[in-house]
Image: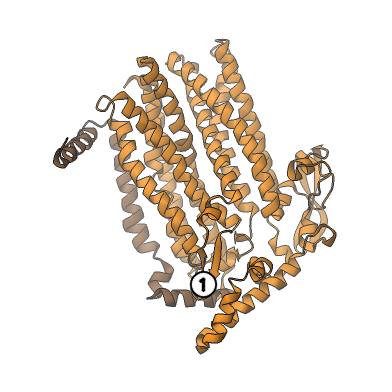
Chain colours: A brown, B orange
Amino acid sequence: MMSAGKTFGNIFRFYYDGFRSMSWWGKRVWMIILIKLFIMFLILRLFFFPDFLKVNFGTDSERGDYVLEQLTGNK
Amino acid sequence: MIENIDLSLVNWSRGQFALTAIYHWLFVPLTLGLSFILAFMETIYVRTGDETWKKITKFWMTLFGINFAIGVATGIILEFEFGTNWSNYSWFVGDIFGAPLAVEGILAFFLESTFVAVMFFGWNKVSKKFHLASTWLVAIGANLSALWILVANAWMENPVGMVFNPDTARNEMNSFREVVFNPVAVDKFFHTVTSGFVLASVFVIGISSWFLIRKREEMLARKSIFIAGIFGLVSALALALTGDTSARTIAKVQPVKFAAMEALYEGSDDAGLTVIGALTDSGERIGEKKVHDIKMKIEIPGLLSVMTTGQQGGYVPGIKDLINGNPERGIISVSEMMERGRYARQVLTDYKVAKELGDTDSMASLAAKFEDRDFNDNYFKYFGYSYFEHPWQVIPSVPVTFYAFRVMVGLGFFFILLFVMAIWFHRRETLEKNRWFLWLALFSIPLAYLASELGWIVTEMGRQPWIIQNLMPVHVAVSNISAGAVQTTFWLFAVLFTALLIAEVSIMVRQIRIGPKH
């Protein structure tokens, strides 16, 4: 039976070889994925998309009360 | 406060969500369908040992990989928007959305980190059968992943399997089975994935036709056209069937949307199916909404009644019946729904006041109402109607829904014809001789995307003004943020997604031009 260390080693080598021998398009799309994830999570998420309720209220109870206020407000 | 909500904020938030969803949906359907086409092709390779099929599979896998990689995580932006722009909605549905989206997240993570990697890195490194199993698992996993998103979306159109907790102001799931087997979810899943299969089949036939036009890679093109033709035809027939059952479900749970799809204002026992027609202003109004006449109409008499109710002479209500009510047919008016909704909201307001006063006895008796079946079926069910001032406000845009539906269905039938022709010309070995067909197939690729997007436009525009059918209108769901902030991110997304789309198209075109050689 293969040891856990050897299994992980094989998995690592599988990915390592895969990335190393990647074609032109593979490298290009990986670059796009990384840029995209950077923009999405480190720029958009942090600076433009704060969670409105988490930012403005400290607890779930306060968030619930706020939404309750919103739902029952007069129209 | 809701009364202070700026309509331009609602519209910008709505526009931003539509923009994000439309771009996201440019990537998804090809992944859903092409993954199965790859699985079929690789299965033939493993069973026959014919290296041509391996070459063909690897070529289409390259295009699948480009689309998959560029599209991956574009849907996460929709979740960002929920938290920022739609906080009331997110809170209100949180517990219902949590479970399906968590399952989707776990499934997508395992799928993307393991089997997709085996698909791309595993050629000649793992056994043929293991590689094939990975390809099938990617196809099944991608489609199952879509299931959970569609379950969440279906709940918004037909909220079931939950109870509203007035203390937390959230809906809590009380039946996972009801949420998953929601009739809207079942229909939506099969209709959506089969639409992805059709789009991918048109894509494969279109690109293959380009090779034949250029007199290149003829073997790859012919074999691909045959596989995609068969898969596309079966999928397109299933798409038509699931579209029919879907429409029947919509007629039950979203009758105003259904009537808008048909531009049916007057209910009828013998409603005809309008195949094509042009809407014109009749001059009549329902509140501030125009009533349309259908000119140049081609109609199949009685068919809509049969398709909707399953019987000849079945009654199909029109928009006027649904707005004004029709007691003879058991249809209550929107005014009545508004009254019932206001009562439900008053109970919620009383609960809030009792909570502020610390009146625990009143809180307990009022909270019990939200678990009472009669209160839920007759009052809370119409909660969202309490936010409207006029009954006509629940009518969606009839022209958008009517035309989008007809173009989508028309294209669906056109694709059936395209697949039949593809199979026919392939069987007679006359694909190259019929260059008109090759050009038609090539130019059908954008039409497949158009049909796919129009499907979502019918779904989402047709259910306006609701974000959650009957429970929450769009203007109540929106966060109290500035319209300027939403405008800024709207344009940021427009730029980001356009750049991604240009990147995808340019890389894909380059790889198609290179062909399967490298």
Chain hosting mark 1: B
Residue wearing tag 1: B169
Residue A5 lies, in percent from the top left, at 14, 41
Quadrant containing the N terminus of chain A is top left
Q: In this view, does B99 lie above or below B417?
A: below
Quadrant containing the C terminus of chain A is bottom right
Left or right relative to B261: residue A10: left
Residue B2 lies, in percent from the top left, at 57, 74
Identified at 50% across, 56% down, the residue is B176
Residue B138 lies, in percent from the top left, at 39, 36
- Classify mark 1: helix, strand or loop: loop
Q: Nearer the viewer, residue B341 or B28?
A: B341
Identified at 76% across, 45% down, the residue is B309
Is residue B389 shown to the viewer in this render? no
Q: Is residue B303 above or below residue B426?
A: below
Residue B41 lies, in percent from the top left, at 43, 23
Q: Nearer the viewer, residue B24 or B128?
A: B128
Q: Which of B129 and B421 is in front in this view?
A: B129
Is residue B226 shown to the viewer in this render? yes
The amino acid type of the residue labelled 1 equals Ala
The extreme front residue here reads A1
Q: Quadrant for residue B374, please give it.
A: bottom right
Q: Nearer the viewer, residue B64 or B441?
A: B64
Identified at 41% across, 54% down, the residue is B102
